[in-house]
Amino acid sequence: MTTMDSSVKLAAPSTLTAIDVEGKWNIVSERLQKREDERLAEIQKKREQKSETAALQESTLFFTTEFNKEKVAIEAGLSECDRVDKANLIDRFDFLSLSLQKMQKFLAESTMFLPPYEVRLAQETISKLQTQIQEKRDELFPKKKFAFKSKKKVASSEKLFAKTLPENVFQEKVEISLTSCKYENLKDRCLEKFEDEINNRDVALARLENCTVKLYGVPSAVNMYKLKNCRVFTGPVSSSIFITECQDCVFVLPCQQLRIHTTVNSQFYIHVTSRAIIEDCSGVKFGPYNWKYPSLDEHYKISGLNRNKNSWNDIDDFNWLASDTHSPNWSLIPEGELVKSWDELIS
Amino acid sequence: MGLLTILKKMKQKEKEVRLLMLGLDNAGKTTILKKFNGEDIDTISPTLGFNIKTLEHRNFKLNIWDVGGQKSLRSYWRNYFESTDGLIWVVDSLDRLRLQDCKQELQSLLQEERLAGATLLVFANKQDISGALTSEAIKEAMDLENIQTHHWLIIGCSAVTGQNLLEGIDWIIDDIASRIFTMD
Ligand SMILES: Nc1nc2c(ncn2[C@@H]2O[C@H](COP(=O)(O)OP(=O)(O)OP(=O)(O)O)[C@@H](O)[C@H]2O)c(=O)[nH]1
Ligand SMILES: [Mg+2]
């Protein structure tokens, strides 16, 4: 009791100045608390990330294990077919097909968390199993009506193809002319189009050599085909850009999606709000979009592209889906080699 | 009772319809799927694998499969043929350069035994862009009139504005329903 009293008394004289001290203490302790909170938040975040990746790994493992079990079961079922009573064979094949469908469904449900590479592998597996089932079926029911029918069907379809394929392919490709808004079959030229002509239209550039093309406007879509040693600059393209069979070119363009096919040794300075992908390409390099012209801001607004979202440095190579090693087909343009301004180079 | 009849009976009860959506890459398949489902279409990336959506429409349970159309993925299309009631073939109406490829890919699908009973809907997509080929022009270029193996329809549409998406889907459901669900 007495100690308490005395302490109260002792404390009494200092209470006036204590406000000051307390104020400082509050600031310090606030800071300390904040740091502590941040530290805890960081730990929590790391922990969550860790458990998230752990959960992901776990589900992937679960998937591959279950998927493999099904695969083995189907393979076993197939190899038993030779010994199954003829009368039960149809049921057996129905069962195998159903199991395969189940695998497909399981895969579909798992794509949410599976890495693309695993999806691709699993698809390959299903493909193979399907072929195996079909082959076994054909082997065991050689004279069944439906086999005969299917053969006849293939034969007639072959005829159909034979009729349409060889002569027509090239002819019709020429027959369907390109869109009216285009540059085609030109060499050593400097070409420009403006908004009146290209806004909300699709633009085609085909078979150009050694040309510089500038599109000042907002096309809906752009299709480029067989360009050689060209430089192409575009304003914001509201949907997708499609590039095929180009070589030794520089492309400077913003769009929602970019698909690059069968193109070699070319540079891309891009703004892509969703994703750029390559297929059958090599020696393609990427940097961020950096073309400037007076009405660019306004054109961005018209296009509706999100200026703050740019995945220029994350490219999907459809021929390279392994997640642990980088595709040899594309790379980033090294910082020091990035062209800073195009004005002198192209004016 | 054969397996087929049992399957039909089961379907009759749930009225489940399986639609397979295919077409060349860049045609607009994923955009159609998301638009139809009322989702955001600005962030769609080229499809690496496939998407599946199950949705209720007019008392039907629609299972729509959207499979990536890049060249390297086309060999996987056949993984999805089984029990397909309807095939939705999406055409990029701007893509004059590949219209021939487009025709050939569709032709070989139509020869698939496992798609033999499926109804075919061709969407001539991207009609909101001036310069798009009309559905009439595409019908001619792809020689659709010569298809005698499947019920088919071509319809111009836009995945961005949503124009004609519902009309197309309703047609394919009606066609399937008249084949499958009205028996006994
Ligand atoms: N203007 C316009 N653009 C569209 C339309 N439909 C799709 N697009 C655009 O076309 C591009 C391709 O669309 P996706 O839906 O990714 O095409 P996909 O058929 O799924 O392509 P893959 O997944 O590679 O097979 C995107 O940039 C879309 O925004 C349309 O009706 N109008
Ligand atoms: Mg897609």
Image (cartoon, rainbow, N blue to C red):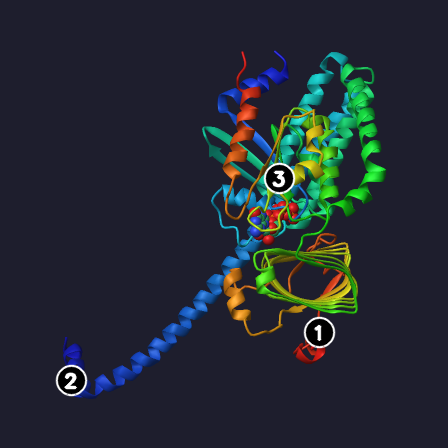
Assess mark 1: CB under 8 A from ligand 1? no
The answer to which of marks 2 and 1 sits earlier in the sequence is: 2
| Above/below status of A95 relative to A230 | above
Provide the chain ID for the residue under circle 2: A
Alpha carbon of mark 2 to alpha carbon of mark 1: how far? Answer: 69 Å
Q: What residue type is labelled 3?
A: Ser
Assess mark 3: CB under 8 A from ligand 1? no
B17 or A187: which is nearer to us? A187
Q: Which residue is drawn at 30% across and 81% down?
A: A25
Q: Where is residue A95 in the image (x, y as percent from the top left)?
A: 67, 23
Q: What residue type is labelled 2?
A: Ala
B47 or A162: which is nearer to us? A162
A1 or B16: which is nearer to us? B16
Within 10 Å of the Cα at label 2, are there few (<14), some (14-19), or many (20+) other Cα atoms? few
Task: Give the residue pinned by disc 1.
Answer: A334
| Above/below status of A89 relative to A175 | above
Task: Give the residue pinned by disc 3.
Answer: B135
- 3 vs 2, front mark: 3
Which quadrant of the figure has residue B119?
top right
- 2 vs 1, front mark: 1
Residue A12, label in figure: 2
**Circle 3 — which element?**
helix
Asked whether the beta carbons under mark 3 and mark 2 sit within 8 Å of each other, the answer is no
Q: Can residue A56 be seen in this view?
A: no
Whether callout 2 and callout 1 share a subunit is answered yes
**Circle 2 — which element?**
helix
Q: Which amino acid does label 1 sit on?
A: Pro
Q: In this view, does A193 lie to the left or right of A170?
A: left
| Above/below status of B151 relative to B163 | above
Alpha carbon of mark 3 to alpha carbon of mark 2: how far? Answer: 92 Å
Q: Is residue A15 left or right of residue A180?
A: left
Q: Quadrant of the N terminus of chain A?
A: bottom left
